[in-house]
Image (cartoon, rainbow, N blue to C red):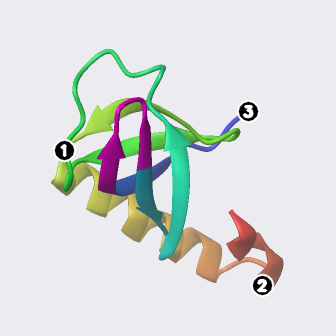
Amino acid sequence: MCLAIPSRVLEVDDLMAVVDSAGERRKVSLILMHEDVAVGDYVLIQHGQFAFERVDAERARESLALMEEIFAQGPADVRAW
């Protein structure tokens, strides 16, 4: 089972993007995207650094807040997501 992390797009360069994922900058592939992605969009990121779905900002923020709440209750090393 994979956990998809909502991440905000900071830069787009053809089929690659730089995203803010839980406060960390990551370079991800957009090759699995079926729609255009722009700076400021939120995308879901899977293990392996592939973006696969664009999500609206409200849904992304709700998901991130829920993840923070859940992870705050677990062991410290769970933050490595």
Q: Residue drawn 69% across and 75% down?
A: 79
Residue 7, x across and y down, in percent: 40, 55
Residue 11, x across and y down, in percent: 32, 54
Who is closer to the viewer here, 63 or 80? Answer: 80
Of pointers 3 and 1, the one earlier in the residue sequence: 3
The span from disc 2 to disc 3 (Cα, nearest Å) is: 21 Å
Q: Residues within 10 Å of mark 3 (few under 14, many from 20)?
A: few
Q: Is residue 36 above or below residue 22?
A: above
Q: Look at mark 3 in the image and give the residue it sits on.
A: 1
Of pointers 2 and 1, the one earlier in the residue sequence: 1
**Total tally of numbered discs in the picture:** 3
Residue 76 disc label: 2
| Secondary structure character of the magenta stretch overall | strand
Residue 56 disc label: 1
Q: Residue drawn 54% across and 52% down?
A: 27
Mark 3 in CB contact with mark 1 (< 8 angstroms)? no
